[in-house]
Amino acid sequence: MQQTILALGALMITMMITVNQQQSIFRVQQLGYIRELENAAMDFGASRLEQIMNTTAFDEVVVGATEMAFEASDFTNLAQLGPDGAEHADQFATFDDLDDYDGFEETVTHVMSADTFRFQVSYVVEYISPSSPNVVPGSPTMAKQLTASIQSETMVGDKRANVVMKRVAIITDSF
């Protein structure tokens, strides 16, 4: 009888060790896949932010301007950031300056290597101090920061990949 109880106890200990090992392996695999999603999100974010910075003007007053001497007071008021005029709030292809992206959200499919990922992306544009990028003033400045918050649609366990990327545009006298 004692041997049976000891054998049963040893079997239970072995099962507990096996279950803990399997949980540990799952967590390692989960973190690996989350990191893969984060890398894909960073790859998408870097290319999208570069595309935006290279194809849009700093501000609406710069679009089509013949004279390139501006002051901060010439730029879009904080309360008016976002799409304006002929731009459509759901079509970033119509955006012609950075602040049009403020509040814009999109769902994208990103192909990286042999994998395809889907992300929810939301953008925020804010004026920042050119000399102290962490300071957000209450009025227009010569610098804007575009922030993209990228979240994977895929959940791994109870986790999603979340990446926040920022790019800064500064307009100078030598524009």
Image: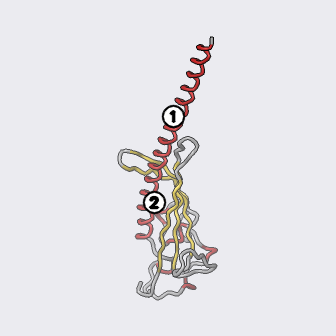
Name, please, the residue furthest toward the top: 1
- Comparing labels 2 and 1, the label whose residue is closer to the camera: 1
Look at the image and tell me in which quarter the N terminus lies.
Answer: top right
Mark 1 surroundings within 10 Å by alpha-carbon count, few (fewer than 14), some (14 through 19), many (20 or more): few
Q: Are marks 2 and 1 in contact (CB under 8 Å)?
A: no
Name, please, the residue furthest toward the front: 2
> Hey, what amino acid is under mark 2?
Gly
Mark 2 surroundings within 10 Å by alpha-carbon count, few (fewer than 14), some (14 through 19), many (20 or more): many
| Residue tagged 2 | 45
Q: Position of residue 114 (x, y in %)?
A: 36, 45
Residue at horizontal 56 percent and vertical 46 percent from the top? 159
Residue at horizontal 57 percent and vertical 26 percent from the top? 13
Q: Position of residue 3 (x, y in %)?
A: 59, 14
Residue at horizontal 47 percent and vertical 78 percent from the top? 170
Real-space Cα separation, disc 2 to disc 1, in angstroms: 36 Å
| Residue tagged 1 | 21
**What secondary structure is marked by label 2?**
helix
Q: Position of residue 174 (x, y in %)?
A: 41, 86
> Hey, what amino acid is under mark 1?
Gln
Q: Quadrant of residue 4?
A: top right
